[in-house]
Image: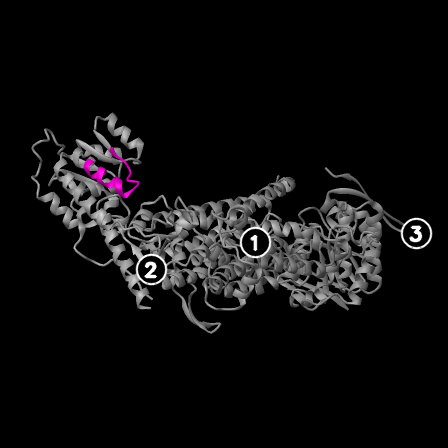
Amino acid sequence: MSRLNVQNLTVRRGQCPVVDNVSLSVGAGEVVGLIGPNGAGKTTLLRAILSLLPFEGTSSLAALDPRARARAAAWMPQAREIAWPVPVETLVMLGRVPHLAGGAKPSEADHAAVASAIAAMHLAGFETRPATELSGGEQARVLIARVLAQDTPLILADEPIAGLDPAHQISTMEVFRREAAAGKTVIASIHDLGLAARHCTRLILMDKGKLVADGTPEEVLTADNMARVFRINAHLSSDASGLLFQPLSVLA
Amino acid sequence: MSVLRPYSKPAFAAVLAAAVSTAAPLSAQDIDPPARVVSMNLCTDQLAMLLAAPGQLLSVSYVALDPLSSAMADEAQDYVINHGGAEEIYLLQPDLVLAFEWSDPIAISMLRRLGIRVEQVPNAYSLADIGPNIRLVGGLLGRAAEAEAMATAYESRLAELTTPDETGPRAAFYGANGVSSGTWSMSHQLVTAAGFHHIADELQITAAGQLPLEMLVLADPDIVFSPELYAGASQAESILDHPAYRAVAKDAGAFTTSATWDCGTPLVIEALEDLHAARDRILQEETAE
Amino acid sequence: MSFRGLMILLTALCAVLFAASLLIGPAGFGIGESLSALFGGQGDAITLVMQEIRLPRALLGVMVGVSLGMSGAALQGYLRNPLAEPGLIGVSSSAALGAVIAMQTGFAKTVAFTLPILGITTELTMGLPLAGLAGAVVSVLLILFLSGPRGNSLTLILAGIAISALAGALTSLVLNLSPNPYAIYEIVFWMMGSLANRSFSHVWIALPFMAVGWVMLARLGRGLDALTLGEDAAEALGIRLTRLRLTMVIGVAACVGAATAVSGAIGFVGLVVPHILRPLVQARPSALLWASALGGAAMVLAADVFVRVILPEQDLKLGVLMALIGAPLFLHLLYKTRRAMA
């Protein structure tokens, strides 16, 4: 079953296409890593999929009205903005906005969703702390918890694990995998190819706005792709625990 | 309800004009009267227009043209208009400039440096100061005899019209921004001379200042004096549209003061005459009730 | 303190200050005397003072305070910047410019309605608040255009300085060109604001615009909460940002436009009140909106009582007092946000 269907999506900045004729389809249970060098168009693609900017082509999410879209997909932007010193619990509760009727008080189910998201991101004990007083990594986890609390079939996240310590990078990827195992779908742009290789079920490689590879990590992280797109030399192997990927050197 | 207005009667100005015109054009006893006189202040404008011989006064200030401030706005149209600037006055080549006690000191000192004779007329703080001022300006213009006649006419009429009465009708002043006159003002002297009791006495207001509207309401005046409204709206004057003010003014009778109140000239006699008429009418209404 | 507790406390504070506003004045009456005159109606002097002078003044204090407090909270929530305030970013001075132009062109006396209010046929002219609203709309749109949707402090304050300066200069120009010699003296009124000598006609002309503004701003709560996460996240939470922006602009313009048209530009209310109350509502923008409405009313009422107590004979402008309280706080906020501005 397809959770997201994107056909011939193009985003132009002036005349220049930033995302160039991308088509993809993502099903339930997948953890998709969106990889590519800086400026490849990953963020723009994700925002266009959510109809946050004008584009040509089709996205199944963009066709929904805003409220239905917010119940179908959660979005974690790259800019980790927390404008006011609201308590962590209140911030995570913002994920329940699409589920609440205007002016309604949060129900038991809303509180339960918030509590489980806080637990999943190891934020127990932080509930009443002002979110702005936490460290950068802790804030990132609070924002991921907010996305989890939205409890949508599809999660789109723009560099969710950037800036986290290794333990929380790994545990966050594990949370995504757990969500996927429960039937959800996660699409996240990731710069750490090692984590992407180990934790994603599928990788999509972008370069200069174009989708250049789409498949399992082994299929995408080939020496040829690494050389052509990232201009790096890398080591890829696998053992019982999964794939091991390590960039080694920059190609001349 | 009564709305009292200054009513017309043979203007005292005509009496004054008659006093001046009976005399010869330029008195022989003055050896060298000034021939090109410029006045740069509203009050000296009016004294000069009243006293000068034909052709002797060249220019008056622009304020003299404003009927809301000047009691002689019509007469002022016959003169060159100045704005009190040293340069424009110098170019008129006057041999006498009449300025007021508080006229722009910079313009005055510049004119004096340029060799122009500038005479400053003191402020009239009371009705009694007006006679000496008439004589002073008359002397400067070489019109001492005419000035003496005018001052005498003023003083005798003033004596007739000065009938103070502490128990008379209660009078209040109220203008833009809720500003009211105090006991130090010429307005206070005019109403008390005409036999009114000014509420500033009991409220112990000396200098002009703002009187809260609720204090005016509680003072319960028999008559409220307010200036004429200027063209063009101002929020300051909108207080005279306030329902509480309108209620007081309606009960008390509203009296619009005119330009004759503004300067210490013999024309204040007209204001006094209007005040006496207003007082008579209030007393008649009281006896009729 | 719970939100409900805070709201009850603020309501009680407003009630006390409203009573103080009615009972304190240059003419000292007893409390019983004042209240019987307020609710009676024998047409004597005390009745006139209570019903026509003090009551409209106290009511306007509440209305202006609610409007300015809510507008400040809404602008700050939308721009995610605690420095955004109608007075500081030029909305109030632009509204004042609109009102001054309306007075000088005669537009203020147009758009007339004759309405039976409390059994009395009253003629009301809506030109003044309409013009204030128009001035406010222009400035809010300019601010949004100049400072961008994210409300960066530096561009916001710079845009505000430019708009305030221009509106202030044009207000002075219009008043200078007026044939009325008193007009020039009211630059202070329009720049600083006052509730002195207001009457019920001011209440009636401001109320419809303010009521529309309050309803508009009250609807923003959910969107402002979501905006805590930024525009992208808010939009992905189902908030229609275009509609939110339009509602905010019209709501703020209606509130500030009407308030300024009847009381001049009273600054800093929308800065001080949300700043004090933010910690008490745990910084939730939606809760702050309501708390600032009551807090603004309390602040303006308190300031208006205070100007009558400390200098009863002088017409101390409300805005002067607000600036004395607000400007140091503004400097403090600037100091705190200077890193963000660098």
Name the colour scheme: one colour
Q: Position of residue B164 (x, y in %)?
A: 30, 50
Confirm or deny contact between disc 2 and disc 1 (CB under 8 A).
Answer: no
Q: Are marks 2 and 1 on the same chain?
A: no
B64 shown above or below C220: above
Q: Quadrant of residue B215?
A: bottom left
Instruction: Give the spatial CA distance, label 2 vs label 1.
Output: 35 Å
**Residue C234 in view of the camera:** no
Taking the image as shown, residue A46 lies to the left or right of residue A199, namely: left
| Residue located beneath label 3 in the image | A240
Q: Which residue is mark 2?
A: B254
- Verify CB contact (< 8 Å) between mark 3 and mark 2: no
What secondary structure is found at the residue carrying circle 1?
helix
Q: Is residue B129 magenta?
A: yes
**Mark 3 Cα-neighbour bin, 10 Å: few <14, some 14–19, many ≥20:** few
Residue B169: in magenta span: no
Chain that bears disc 3: A
Disc 3, SS:
loop
Q: Dot 1: within a 10 Å radius of its alpha carbon, few (fewer than 14), some, or many (20 or more) residues?
A: many
Q: Residue A234, which numbered label?
A: none
Q: Is residue C241 left or right of residue C284?
A: left
C-alpha distance separating marks 1 and 3: 71 Å
Name the residue: 77% across, 69% down. Answer: A1
Q: In terms of secondary structure, where does tag 2 sit?
A: strand
| Of the two numbered discs 1 and 3 in the rendering, the one whose residue sits closer to the viewer | 1
Q: Nearer the viewer, residue C141 or B70?
A: B70
Residue C300: which disc? Answer: 1
Q: Identify the amino acid type marked 2.
A: Ala
Q: Amino acid at mark 3?
A: Ala
Residue A248 in percent (x, y) is at 80, 40
- Provide the residue span drawn in magenta: B120-135
